[in-house]
Image (tube, grey):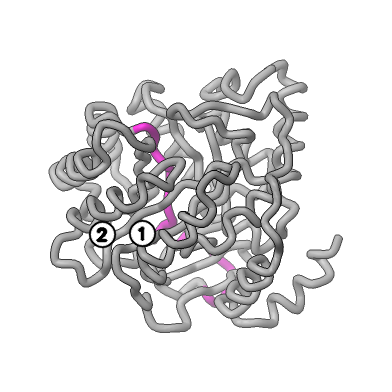
Amino acid sequence: MLFDLVRPAIFALDPERAHRLTINGLKALPPGTPPGSDPALATQVAGVRFPNPVGLAAGYDKDAEVPDAMLGFGFGSVEIGSVTPRPQAGNPKPRLFRLIEDEAVINRMGFNNAGAAAALSRLRKRAGRPGVVGVNIGANKDSEDRIADYAKMTQLMAPFASYLAVNISSPNTPGLRALQDEGALAALLDAVFEARGGVGPPVFLKVAPDLEPADIDAIAHIAIESGLSALLVSNTTIARPDLASPHRIESGGLSGAPLRDLALQRIRDFRKATGGRIPLIGVGGIASAQDAWARIKAGASLVQLYSALVYEGPGLPRRINEGLLAAMQREGYSTIAEAVGSE
């Protein structure tokens, strides 16, 4: 396969430079129509029809430069961002590390992005094109009022987003995860819903995997009471399981294969805490159809991936969807929705 041939050359480059070159290459492709998916893979979450359950997680396309190109690889949805009101450079480089021995990534990017205006200009240009494109919103690191930042981003992005993902779980912006605390979270969601108004895209919340049981219960309660449409479970972890790579000492959020078991357990935890009353989206450590199927059976209506693309290449979403179809047929499910939480 082509990716296997070019991967050594890609891995010879600094990870952030390699990513930038990839984005530039994808920008050169003409926008096409997303390929069709088997109807059995389609599912509806929060009123949005997803042609298949495999989405691209936020972080890959921070500035909405290549959502259509990524949809062309077979993703059922693409989440751009995180986008902040004002541009910000992020943390000092180097800040992105491949842990090749562990099939993992550590990043401490720090919400580097070109700001709301740049993303909006691109989203306006693609308005009316097919495909589910969500917008992951964040707050500026130096903001005096982060809740106001989220409200502003909601107002700006709502007209152009299939859904909004409120990201309060990145470990790379100091103090951001404090917004997961019960009181702060309730105030934040009140502000977001007020900014969106009565009509607008569904609002999802992205949470960290590093939560205590009491945190999970509190977030689940607020999610149900506030009218959130889904929970994205989960972001990167600050934990360090047994890792082999010399980069294991780097600070930042860990993603990829070592996050698999923790993220799967968090889906089970939130499924139990919510009683299945709110859709869950499984993120973290998904690199195969088997991983995706386990997440779905544990309670995820959709899944997302990013780090696995580094090691498996752009054919991964299609391979996962093919594997999901085979699993559905093997276990006697006619739709993805039937399998959700079936374990």
Q: Nearer the viewer, residue 190 or 285?
A: 190
- Observer able to see residue 216: yes
Q: Does the magenta stretch include residue 105?
A: no
Residues marked 2 and 1 touching at CB (< 8 Å): yes
Q: Residue 70's x, y, as percent? A: 64, 54
Q: Residue 150's x, y, as percent? A: 25, 53
Q: Quadrant of the C terminus?
A: top right
Q: Please tell me whether mark 1 sits on a helix, a strand or a loop.
A: loop
Q: Please tell me whether mark 2 sits on a helix, a strand or a loop.
A: helix
Q: Measure the C-alpha gap from mark 2 to mark 1.
A: 7 Å
Name the residue rendered at 24%, 37% in the picture: 197
Q: Which of 156 and 72 is in front in this view?
A: 156
Q: Is residue 236 magenta?
A: yes
- Image disc number at residue 28: none
325 versus 252 height, above or below: above
Q: Quadrant of residue 141?
A: bottom left
Which residue is under mark 2?
Answer: 176
Name the residue rendered at 70%, 26% in the picture: 39
Name the residue rendered at 73%, 37% in the picture: 36
Using residue 4 as the reference point, say whether residue 181 is left or right of it.
Answer: left
Range of the magenta residues? 229-247
Using residue 28 as the reference point, say whether residue 195 is left or right of it.
Answer: left
Name the residue rendered at 60%, 81% in the picture: 14
Main secondary-structure element of the magenta-colored stretch = loop
Say what amino acid the circle numbered 1 marks. Ser
Report how many numbered discs are placed on residues in the image: 2
Q: Residue 254's x, y, as percent? A: 47, 62
297 versus 161 height, above or below: above
Label 2 packing within 10 angstroms: few (<14), some (14-19), many (20+): some
- Observer able to see residue 239: no
- Image disc number at residue 170: 1
